[in-house]
Every structure is written in C-alpha cells, then in structure tokens.
Image (cartoon, rainbow, N blue to C red):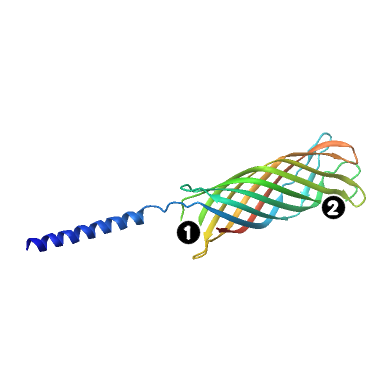
C-alpha cells in the first residue's frame, strides 16, 4: 500500500513538472535568431515640388514616378532590430515649372526628368504586435541627384548632377508566408537630401534645389 502510494505520488510529481515546463515553454517568447536577408521593393514615388535661389522663385512640378530598392540585411540576435545596406533608385519626369525665370514665361511646355541613386544604411525595429507585424525604420547615406536637361521646347534652364547627404524614415507592415522563409511587406517612406546647387543657364544665376520625396512601396524579403 505504501509502495503504491509512493508510486502514485512520483507519477503525479512528474506529471506536474511536465505541465509546468510546458506552460513555461508556451509563455516564454521565442528568442530572435540572427539571419541574413535579401529584400526587394518597388512602387510609386512623388517628388515634392521645389526650387529656390538668389533672384529666382520657381518650382519644379513633377509627375508621379517610380522607385525600386534592393537591400542586404541582418537580424540582430536577441533583439527585434534589423540593420541593412540598401540601394534605392527613384525617377520622375518634370510636369511643369511654376513661376519660371524671365524668358520662359511665354512658353508652356517643359521637359526633363530627375533621378536619384542612393546608397543607404538602415535600421528597423519590429513592434510587438502579432499577425501583421508593424515596423519603423530610419536610414542615412549618400544620394546622387541628377536633373537631366530641364528645359522648354527651345531653351535649357539647367542640367545638374551632384551628390549629397541623404536621410529617410520608414513605416510599414510585414506578413509572414506560412512554411516559407518569406515575408511580404507594404511600406511608406519619406526621403530627403541636403539642397543641390545649380546655375540657371539662361539667366546665369546660382540657386539651390531642395529635394524630398514620398514613396509607397510593396516588397518581399527572404531569409537565408
């Protein structure tokens, strides 16, 4: 009888220990694992209207453009943080020039485009919300801003390419694809550089061009 009681007590103790261990396993968050990722993104970009300078008061107005990005990233172990190196391309055509300099006021058709090639270092933080996983991020780097043949039908206003300090902020959501090491994402980001300097060819006047853009991107990220 005593032996049977001891055996029952041992079984109950083992079962209790198993249940407690199981509960701790379920309630303890999974430790983040380090991993290398490849991200591809693409979408629509809107360049902010801009243009200013000594004796000039004009704005470049843009059509909607497109953007694409590729990045190699790394998930930091034990932390909800990802770091990455990214190449970002943006392009949009000039729609019109508001308040053009003297000599352009009688002309209504403008042409040219602006493109941006940027190399950025980004850091993202994943927010602790399940299912659709939101994230925020910041990035800094360098960008070459190229204004190509900004002109009218008969006269060129300026043509400029220069490299500047760039920065950006991102907010988005991730969706993990079941079974696969793949995440889909939707993202908004704001991108800007320090002002570019140029000279209006017709009036031979120096001016600054502030550059900023708004991007709506869709993408995918695979982990290796």
Position of the C terminus by quadrant: bottom right
Which of the two labelled residues, at mark 2 and mark 1, occupies the earlier sequence position? 2
Q: Is residue 26 left or right of residue 17?
A: right
Q: Is residue 57 above or below residue 90?
A: above
Q: Residue furthest bottom?
A: 179
- How many circles with numbers are drawn on the protein? 2
Q: Is residue 58 above or below residue 16?
A: above
- The percent coordinates of residue 119 (x first, y second) are 68, 47
- Residue at the front extreme of this rendering: 3
Q: Is residue 135 left or right of residue 201?
A: left
Residue 203 position within the rendered picture, expressed as x and y whole percent measured from the top left: 90, 38
Q: Which mark is residue 173?
A: none
Label 2 crowd bin: few (<14), some (14–19), many (20+), radius 10 Å: some
Q: Which residue is mark 2?
A: 111
Residue 115 vs residue 80: left or right?
right
Identify the residue position indicated by label 1 in the image: 131
**Which residue lies at the image location 87% right of the left edge and 49% below the top edge?**
151
Residue at 11% x, 61% y: name it. 5
Side (left or right) of 141 relative to 131: right
Instruction: From the top left corner, tell me how far across and down residue 84 is, in percent.
Output: 59, 48
Q: Is residue 105 visible?
A: no
- The answer to which image quadrant residue 23 occupies is bottom left
Could you tell me residue 25's position as x and y percent?
34, 55
Which quadrant is home to the N terminus?
bottom left
């Amino acid at each position: 009888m005593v032996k049977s009681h001891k055996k029952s007590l041992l079984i109950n103790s083992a079962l209790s220990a198993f249940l407690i261990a199981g509960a701790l396993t379920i309630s303890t968050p999974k430790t983040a694992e380090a991993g290398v990722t490849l991200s591809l993104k693409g979408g629509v970009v809107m360049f902010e209207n801009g243009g200013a300078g000594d004796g000039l008061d004009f704005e470049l107005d843009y059509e909607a453009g497109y953007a694409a990005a590729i990045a190699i990233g790394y998930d930091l172990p034990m932390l909800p943080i990802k770091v990455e190196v990214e190449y970002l391309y943006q392009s949009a055509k000039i729609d019109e020039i508001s308040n053009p300099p003297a000599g352009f006021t009688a002309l209504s058709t403008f042409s040219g485009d602006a493109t941006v090639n940027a190399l950025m270092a980004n850091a993202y933080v994943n927010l602790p919300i399940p299912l659709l996983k939101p994230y925020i991020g910041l990035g800094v780097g360098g960008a070459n801003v190229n204004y190509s043949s900004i002109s009218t039908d008969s006269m060129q206003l300026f043509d400029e390419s220069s490299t500047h300090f760039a920065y950006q902020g991102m907010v988005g959501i991730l969706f993990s694809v079941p079974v696969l090491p793949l995440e889909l994402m939707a993202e908004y980001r704001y991108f800007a550089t320090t002002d570019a300097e140029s000279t209006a060819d017709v009036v031979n006047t120096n001016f600054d061009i502030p550059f900023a853009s708004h991007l709506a991107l869709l993408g995918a990220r695979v982990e290796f």
